[in-house]
Structures are given as C-alpha cells and as structure tokens.
Image (tube, grey):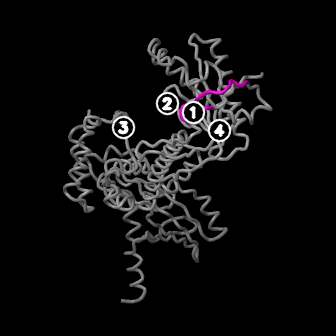
Amino acid sequence: MTIEAINEQLLRAIGVGVALLDRQTLRFGFRNDTFEEWFTGETEQTRLQELFADLDVTAMQEGLTQSGRYASEIRFKKKRRTLVVALDFTAAEEDVLVLVCQNITRIKELESMIDSYSMMVERNTREIKREKEQVEKLLLNIMPRSVYEEYKTFGVVTPQMYDPVSVLMLDFVGFTEMVASQDPSVTVTELNDIYSAFDRIGEQFGCERIKTIGDAYITVAGLPDPTPDHAKAIANTAIRFVRYLNRRNLSHPHQWQCRIGLSTGSVVGSVVGIQKYVYDIFGPAVNLASRLQEISEPMEITVQDSVANVLKDQFDLKNMGERTIRGFGDQDIWRLYDNN
Amino acid sequence: MAERTLYEKYGGFSQVSKIVLSFYDTLLDNDEVGPFFDDVDMSRIVDHQTKFIASLLGGPASYSDNQLRQLHSHLSITDAHFDELEAVLSGALQNHGMTDEDVEAVVAEFGKRRPLIVR
C-alpha cells in the first residue's frame, strides 16, 4: 500500500467529515465516509448551497478572501434529534476549498444541560439565601446583633456582664380583665401595635428591647454597647411611651394604661435554653425595675433614687419619699414627668 | 440531618448528567414516546430531561402537582406512553449502576405522577 493510499484510507475513515470543493463553483469534488453519512440524503446534492441552505455564502467568500478561513455552525434534524455540526472552510491551493465538519452535538447538549442545571442551582441558592436572611432576622429579634454574631461563630454565647445599664419595665393596668372582657384577638392585635411602636421609640434612643412577657415589656439602654447617657435614654423612652399611649387613647375605644419602673445597675445578658433559646438579662436592676413598676400609678413613671440624681438637671422629677421595696430595703423613689 | 437523596448517593450532577444524556438518547430513538419531542427545540428537551431526572432523584428541581398537570395538559399521553417511558427510565437508571431497590423507588415516584400526566 502506498503512503497516498493509506492517507486516503485514513481520510475516509476518520470521525470528522471532510469534503473538497471547487472554490468558484462550490461543487463537491471529494467527500469522506463520515461526511456522506451525515449529509447525504435521498437526492445527491452537488453544490454547497444545496446541501446547506442556511449557510451565508457571501460571508463565507468574504472570510476566505480576507483570511483564507471561515467557520460556521449548522443545525439540522436527523430523525427527531438536532445535530449541530461545526463547519470549517480553508482555502487551499488551486481554487480548492477544504471543508472540515465536526459533530459538536454532544457539546451543545451538554451546554444546554449545564445551563439548565446552573439555573436550578442558582435559584436554589437564592432561596437558601432568602431563608438564611429570614432566620437571621428572627434571631436578631430575640438577641442583640453582637450576641448573634458570637452565637453564629461559636455556636454558644458566653454570659456577659453589662455595667452600668438602665432598665425599663412596663406593664399594663387591668390587662387580665381586658383580655377576659374583650375579644382576645383584638386585644392581642392592639398589643402588637403598641409593642411595635415601643420598639420604634426605643430604637430612636438606642434601647434594646429584651423581651415581652404577656403585657410586660422590658427594654434596656447601655446594652450591648456601653452608652454613657443610658439613664437619659431610658427616661426619654419612658416619657415617649406614655405620650404615645395618651395620644393613642384619644382615638381608640380601648384605653391602655401603663405603669413604668426605671432602674440602673448591672445585668448579665445571655442566651438561655438550647432548643427554644431566648436572650435574657438577669440582675438586681431588672428586679428593681419590676418592683418600681409595681408601685407606680397608672400612666406614671417611677424612678430609682440613683437614676433620679442623674436626671434631675434635665428632667422634671418629683420626690415621692422613702418606700420599702421588697428585696431592696428602704429607698427614696421619684416620679418622672413629661415636661413638654 | 435530612436523609441523603438518591441524587447525592449517585454522585450528584456529575454522575446524574450521564443518566440524563443516556435517557435523552434512548428517548429520542424511541418511536413510541419520541414523537412528543419531534418539534421541540434541543435545548428545551435537554432542560426538560435534566429537571425530570433531578426532580425524581431528589436533586435541585421540584415540580408541584399543578405544574406537572399544567405542563402536560396539551399532550395526549396515554397509559401506553407512560408505561413506555417508565421502561426507558428504569433502563437508563439500571445502565448507570443504580441498585434494583433504588430503581424501584424512583419508578414508584414516577408512577405517582401518572394521574397528572395521562389523560
């Protein structure tokens, strides 16, 4: 067998479609077996344009004149399967055009599959991200951000001492009777409105709402970041809580009356529980705020002696004399008024 | 922890992509169910098959019953067609080394959709 014969054998058997054309007439001279297999239909097409009707012949001729090469892609159906073939024209000597065809169907199918898959994955990733944000939002509702960051990083929260902070404890007068006498769902809806307003007010003065237990609302100034004027912040918040309720009561059939106690001291903040964890604070300041709230009159703010001393210069306060406070002995208590 | 899906068990997308392609090949050559795809664009068929296999194996795709009913509502798919596709599906799964037990589980999942697809 001569080298030429071997070459021709190879050219015929190769898995790439090869054809030779006349550059001028675009008539086929030679087609290898693969080419025949792909493109020979019932009738024999002798010219390029007949075989590939979609091919832009003008563009091809231009490309050949400029660089001697032209590449294109054609799609056609074999039975119901779309075949994609890459065409590569090269101008050879003596007006011969070499056409090399590669079956890139599988590549195109894989590309489509990757598109499909990546779209599914991207959509899922977006969903997961959204869910993560939801979870984060929920957790941030029950603990300060810095505590949440610690929880996220280490999986636990070390109890931390905050000293000094100011604590506000609020409770509604006659809430139990209200729930019993009114439609409970209405009462709860209103309570939700009021708490939401309290949250917004507290936020303005840098207070962190710790929790609500039924009709009791606890918020703290000076936590998690120390604030030098925590007492003023809590006093301003308390005054605006009362102001808000007074205004709300003017236009609502249900009258909401609150009692407020303000105290200063140290507290320990931590996440408590494992499955149903809550962020909570503990310490004498919390208990004292609760006692002061209890001895407060409706729509009045009762203030611990040491808090009153800090506030005196800027707020309207009245000494209520000495009282015995359970667990805290005898102390002077004060009443804080809205001087506006 | 959530239970491991078949999708994960059989190697995720890199392996499942092979099942999809062989399923795609057999399906188009099949003269019973192939004609449903006669006039459908290649990328759409591939997209469809990728999601089909992924959703059956518990991968990153899922269709609600309503979506499936809606998507097939314009096709006259008979029980015979459905049976044929079931055979093609279980063939493709078996050819890629899925255990008989798992193939059965997938085919059972597939079978649950019959009332949504067949009219």
Looking at the image, residue A260 sits to the left or right of residue B41; the answer is: right
Q: Provide residue A134's location: percent of width, then percent of height.
A: 51, 41
Marks 1, 4: nearer the viewer: 4
Q: Label 1 is placed on what type of residue? A: Ile
Magenta segment main secondary structure: strand
Kindly report the distance in space between the C-alpha atoms of the residues bearing marks 4 and 2. 21 Å
Kindly report the distance in space between the C-alpha atoms of the residues bearing marks 2 and 1. 8 Å
Q: Are marks 2 and 1 in contact (CB under 8 Å)?
A: yes
Kindly report the distance in space between the C-alpha atoms of the residues bearing marks 2 and 3. 41 Å
Q: Provide the secondary structure element on which disc 4 rests.
A: strand
Q: Residue furthest top?
A: A253
Q: Provide residue B3's location: percent of width, then percent of height.
A: 31, 52
The residue tagged 4 is A264
Q: Are marks 4 and 2 in contact (CB under 8 Å)?
A: no
Q: Provide residue A306's location: percent of width, then percent of height.
A: 69, 36
The residue tagged 1 is A218
Kindly report the distance in space between the C-alpha atoms of the residues bearing marks 1 and 3. 45 Å
Q: Do tags 4 and 2 sit on the same chain? A: yes
| Residue drawn at (73%, 24%) of the image | A318
Q: Do tags 4 and 3 sit on the same chain? A: no
Q: Provide the secondary structure element on which disc 3 rests.
A: loop
Q: How many marks?
A: 4
Callout 2: chain? A
Q: Provide residue B16's location: percent of width, then percent of height.
A: 35, 58
Labelled disc at residue B64: 3
Callout 4: chain? A
Which of these two is toward me, A107 or A145?
A: A145
Magenta stretch: give its range: A318-330
